[in-house]
Image: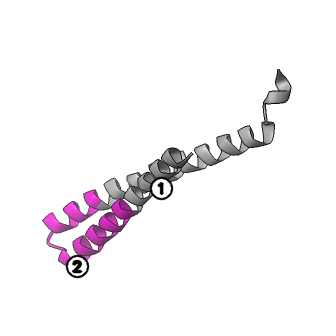
Amino acid sequence: MTAAIHWGTLGEVVVVSLAAGIGVSLVFSLVILASARATEHGRAGRGGQALGFGVLAALALLAFGAGIALALSVMLGK
């Protein structure tokens, strides 16, 4: 029964899943942080900094969406 388990493949799945989970969580955390900072700076009258954080939030959101799309593509392609 243990011969049917490919330990190398199982280990690869664990490592990739862990890395993807941490990466996606960090990118979404960046979306939240940059959005909050953009709002803070906007209310304080610092428009340039608010714009910078807004752009950072938008780029992080695009990266998050791309990560989700890649994950769905990989899962549905298998």
Residue 63 in percent (x, y) is at 41, 62
Residue at x 18%, y 75% (from the top left corner): 47
The overriding secondary structure of the stretch rendered in magenta is helix
Of the 4 image quadrants, the one containing the C terminus is: top right
Vertical position of residue 7 compared to residue 53: above or below: above
Residue at x 23%, y 71% (from the top left corner): 50
Task: Decide which of tag 2 and tag 1 comes sooner along the chain.
Answer: 2
Tell me the mark number nearer the camera, choosing from 2 and 1.
1
Vertical position of residue 60 compared to residue 73: above or below: below
- 39 is within the stretch colored magenta: yes
Vertical position of residue 54 compared to residue 25: above or below: below
Give the residue number, with chain letter if any, for mark 2. 48
Instruction: Give, as a single range, the part of the protein colored magenta.
Output: 35-62
- Gap between marks 2 and 1 measured at Cα: 33 Å
| Side of 13 where 44 appears, left or right | left
- 59 is within the stretch colored magenta: yes
Give the residue number, with chain letter if any, for mark 1. 70
